[in-house]
Image (spheres, rainbow, N blue to C red):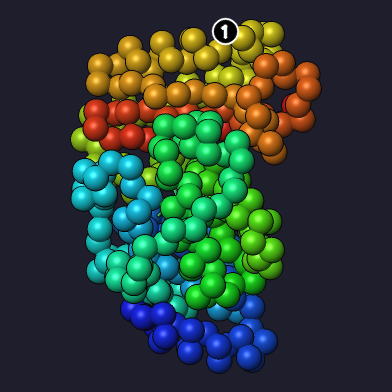
């Protein structure tokens, strides 16, 4: 496994593979790797000749400075996991390499910027789009792999590809969960043992949406869900929304939709966790 810290080193190495006609799969990450990340790499390995993983904790996309400072970092363990998974190349740039100057581009992300994560994390998706577009320019992958765990981010990336006329094929990968149902996340490392146990309520609650639908009680779901979660002390639901899986428009009546996704963000003490569940109607 080759470890590259500079753009020059990475592009010159990859150009050899690209000229050779090799298919490049790319998995962008912020490190603190877990089985969720590894599942993306495994899918890429099956579909490509070369799998590239990037590890870069992008400072610009954090709304909360403390969240950025406290974001888990463990490159030694990450590299061991990557090597065991059979990753071919790791791109690990520092901030200066990615931002020799500020990135002032503005992407037209439409409604994605004004709902859910877009609404509660202003500017976040502009910076996600910015860093992913830089990474795509460097790696030039055929396919790039993103987790459904970050459901709205996936839509942002699909839109980015569309508005920039990029040829990268975006592959959406299923959410990997803990045994208790909690979606794997690097931020879970910051939960106390008790918070980790209690956080199972997030998935347990959104998973009940199908029962509400069966009983024709769609309209009652959100209020019920917030009550379930917020009754745990130190847990606070920031938002819960049910949106159309394709357009991300808010669902008012399920009869007009083929597939819906229930998205949630919850503060477990200081730690903000997100999750979602998709229901095909
Ligand atoms: P991150 O390092 O959090 O930026 O995540 C890098 C990629 O891994 C993103 O595409 C995430 O959606 C994906 N990912 C994170 N957690 C999971 C999970 N539990 N299951 C599947 N994919 C995940």
Vertical arrangement, residue 96 with respect to residue 58, above or below: below
Q: Position of residue 164 (x, y in %)?
A: 64, 61
Q: What residue is at 25 percent from the left and 52 percent from the top?
A: 72
Other residues around mark 1 within 10 Å, as few (<14) / some (14–19) / many (≥20): few
| In-front residue for pair 180/153 | 153
| 230 displayed left or right of 118 | left
Q: Secondary structure at mark 1?
A: helix
Q: Which residue is mark 1?
A: 220
Counting every numbered tag in the picture gives: 1
Vertical arrangement, residue 24 with respect to residue 71, above or below: below
Q: What residue is at 25 percent from the left and 21 percent from the top?
A: 234
| In-front residue for pair 96/13 | 96
Instruction: Classify the position of the N terminus by image quarter.
Output: bottom left
Q: Position of residue 166 (x, y in %)?
A: 66, 65
Q: Position of residue 134 (x, y in %)?
A: 49, 67
Q: What residue is at 25 percent from the left and 58 percent from the top?
A: 73
Instruction: Classify the position of the C terminus by image quarter.
Output: top right
Residue 175: in sight, yes or no? Answer: no
| 2 displayed left or right of 153 | left
Residue 155: in sight, yes or no? Answer: yes
Residue 216 in which image quadrant: top right
| In-front residue for pair 247/184 | 247
| 221 displayed left or right of 252 | left
Q: What residue is at 63 percent from the left and 24 percent from the top?
A: 250
Q: Position of residue 24 (x, y in %)?
A: 59, 76
Residue 160 in which image quadrant: bottom right
Callout 1: CB less than 8 Å from ligand 1: no
């Amino acid at each position: 496994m080759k470890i590259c810290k500079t753009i020059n080193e990475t592009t010159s190495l990859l150009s050899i593979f690209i000229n050779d006609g090799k298919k490049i799969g790319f998995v962008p990450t912020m490190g603190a790797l877990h089985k969720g990340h590894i599942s993306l790499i495994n899918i890429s390995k099956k579909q490509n000749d070369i799998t590239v993983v990037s590890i870069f904790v992008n400072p610009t996309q954090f709304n909360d400075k403390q969240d950025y400072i406290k974001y888990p970092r463990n490159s030694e363990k990450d590299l061991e996991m990557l090597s065991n998974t059979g990753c071919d190349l790791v791109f690990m740039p520092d901030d200066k390499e990615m931002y020799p100057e500020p990135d002032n581009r503005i992407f037209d992300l439409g409604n994605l910027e004004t709902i859910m994560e877009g609404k509660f994390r202003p500017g976040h998706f502009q910076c996600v789009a910015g860093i992913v577009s830089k990474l795509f320019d460097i790696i030039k992958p055929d396919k790039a792999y993103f987790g459904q765990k970050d459901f709205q981010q996936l839509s942002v990336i699909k839109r980015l590809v569309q508005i920039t006329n990029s040829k990268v094929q975006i592959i959406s990968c299923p959410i990997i969960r803990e045994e208790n149902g909690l979606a794997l996340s690097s931020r879970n490392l910051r939960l106390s043992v008790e918070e980790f146990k209690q956080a199972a309520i997030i998935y347990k609650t959104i998973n009940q949406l199908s029962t509400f639908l069966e009983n024709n009680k769609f309209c009652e779901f959100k209020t019920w869900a917030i009550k379930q979660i917020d009754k745990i002390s130190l847990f606070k639901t920031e938002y819960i929304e049910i949106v159309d899986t394709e357009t991300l428009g808010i669902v008012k009546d399920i009869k007009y939709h083929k597939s819906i996704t229930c998205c949630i963000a919850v503060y477990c003490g200081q730690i903000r966790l997100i999750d979602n569940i998709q229901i095909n109607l």
